[in-house]
């Protein structure tokens, strides 16, 4: 399969990229890792007339600490996330999630910026970003603005990203050093999207859950922040009844579509299992 | 510039400088197979699942059906054709696939070997589980993977032995 014709642009800076996007208008698309866009172009589900390749913009790469925050450049690949000492030390949930995205070859190419900007509810990183309460820096011809990940997703493939803007970086507060974390994902095979997946971070103090965040992947039109599920944990000693209550609360807000991954009821049931397992593993890792 | 205009692309493939005028929509796999006559990398699923088109691009394994040739501008590319030594003697991975029957029909083999090459560069002594995860983006419909895993494991030992010899000299 050969994609439709397009004109290729290789800007060397963010400024040049957003100027190109602004001047070329709606027929232009940014190209990150290309592993969502190129398959869509082969199927003619996307037919951009201009592709603006972000691959040579050094400023969009890398993972760094900025005070009390971790900053990840949008063109950082999943493989670079897996290999990051900063993340291994301070936000290992991202590594656990990146390891269950697609396969090794795709992880060398796929970027975190593309993953979060695409608005595909099946992508894993948006749920992670909800869980970590990340903010995205969106850069357009009139400068940069920040939008909370928790506000960013409107519907499947619809986000707060305006025409002419690109996601340039992701930021989140360094999680507490003693936090517990887990990303649990059931997929039918390597390379498939989740039947359901859950991200959990929590802290424990004096045997009680002091704080918790839970986010859900691929069980609705957008990633979901499971607020009531997290509330069910806070103040509890993370016993079975609290975990059951959290799983039920997560299932209650889910609305997965019936597809090749199974009927709605099955996918909701799997979600409950993922939430339970993620809480139990996060609990075992909390210090 | 119109969308029909051709773009000049230059890269190093198996140590050889190459360049050509291509349409911007030309995929790297088509550039390799049709412009360079390197038909080792195969087109299997064409949807970035099967891994038959895997090549090494600047030290990363990529599925060349999902990369535009223009994205590889200036890159170092390695295909199965570049694995053997100049005198034609097989690379340890090729020899091990031969020895351990790591192929039947051979369709997936160029992708398997180039992928295994990168895996062993990053992890010279992988466990069986690490090999299986390392080649999880490459599908083989003949072997059931057993002999592929054995071959990669054996090649890792051979390469480690060669490195020791080099160090001793």
Image (spheres, helix red, strand yellow):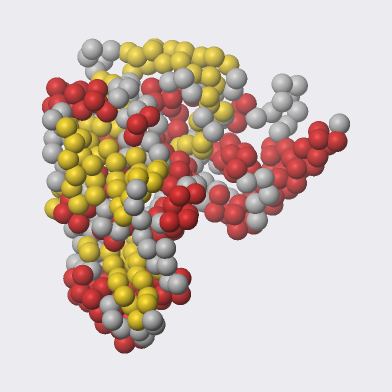
Task: Using residue A38 as the reference point, say whether residue B36 is left or right of it.
Answer: right
What residue is rendered at 69% in x and 43% in y? B97
Q: Pinpoint residue A43: horizontal percent, then vertical percent.
A: 27, 38
Q: Position of residue A193 (x, y in %)?
A: 35, 56
Q: Residue at x 55, y 49 (%)?
A: B134
- Is any atom of residue A54 visible in this view? yes
Q: How many marks?
A: 0
Q: Quadrant of residue A177?
A: bottom left
Closer to us: A133 or B149: A133
Q: Position of residue B53 (x, y in %)?
A: 49, 35
Residue drawn at the location 34% of the way across and 64% of the way down: A199
Q: In the figure, is residue B73 to the left or right of A29?
A: right
Give percent across and percent down for residue A243: 32, 81
Q: Nearer the viewer, residue B139 or A107?
A: A107
Quarter occupied by the C terminus of chain A: bottom left
Examine the image and state in which quarter residue A235 appears: bottom left
Q: Is residue A12 left or right of residue B79?
A: left
């Amino acid at each position: 399969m050969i994609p439709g014709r397009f004109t290729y642009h290789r800007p060397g800076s963010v400024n040049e990229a957003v100027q190109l996007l602004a001047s070329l208008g709606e027929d232009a698309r940014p190209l990150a890792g290309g592993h969502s866009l190129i398959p869509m172009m082969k199927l003619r589900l996307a037919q951009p007339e201009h592709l603006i390749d972000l691959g040579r913009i050094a400023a969009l790469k890398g993972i760094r600490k900025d005070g009390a925050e971790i900053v990840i450049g949008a063109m950082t690949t999943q493989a670079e996330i897996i290999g990051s000492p900063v993340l291994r030390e301070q936000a290992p949930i991202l590594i656990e999630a990146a390891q269950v995205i697609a396969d090794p070859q795709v992880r060398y190419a796929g970027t975190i910026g593309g993953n979060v900007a695409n608005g595909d509810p099946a992508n894993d990183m948006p749920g992670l970003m909800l869980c970590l309460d990340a903010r995205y820096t969106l850069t357009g011809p009139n400068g940069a603005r920040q939008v909370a990940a928790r506000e960013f997703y409107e519907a499947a493939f619809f986000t707060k990203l305006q025409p002419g803007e690109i996601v340039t970086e992701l930021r989140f507060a360094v999680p507490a050093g003693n936090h517990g974390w887990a990303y649990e994902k059931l997929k039918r095979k390597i390379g498939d999207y989740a039947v359901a997946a859950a991200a959990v971070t929590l802290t424990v103090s004096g045997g009680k859950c002091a704080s918790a965040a839970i986010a859900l992947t691929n069980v609705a039109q957008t990633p979901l922040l499971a607020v009531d599920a997290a509330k069910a944990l806070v103040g509890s000693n993370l016993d079975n009844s609290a975990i059951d209550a959290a799983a039920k609360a997560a299932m209650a807000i889910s609305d997965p579509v019936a597809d090749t991954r199974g009927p709605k009821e099955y996918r909701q049931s799997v979600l409950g299992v993922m939430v339970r397992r993620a809480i139990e593993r996060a609990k075992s890792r909390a210090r | 510039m119109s969308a029909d205009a051709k773009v000049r692309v230059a890269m190093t493939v198996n140590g050889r400088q190459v360049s050509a005028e291509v349409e911007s929509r030309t995929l790297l796999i088509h550039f390799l197979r049709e412009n360079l006559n390197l038909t080792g990398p195969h087109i299997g699923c064409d949807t970035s699942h099967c891994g038959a088109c895997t090549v090494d691009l600047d030290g990363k394994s990529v599925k060349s059906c999902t990369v535009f040739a223009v994205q590889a501008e200036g890159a170092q590319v390695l295909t199965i054709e570049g694995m053997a030594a100049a005198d034609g003697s097989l690379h340890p991975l090729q020899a091990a696939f031969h020895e351990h029957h790591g192929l039947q029909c051979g369709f997936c083999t160029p992708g398997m070997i180039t992928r295994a090459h990168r895996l062993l560069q990053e992890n010279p002594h992988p466990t069986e589980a690490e090999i299986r995860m390392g080649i999880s983006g490459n599908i083989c419909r003949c072997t059931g993977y057993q002999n592929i895993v054995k071959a990669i494991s054996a090649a890792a030992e051979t390469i480690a032995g060669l490195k020791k010899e080099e160090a001793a000299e």
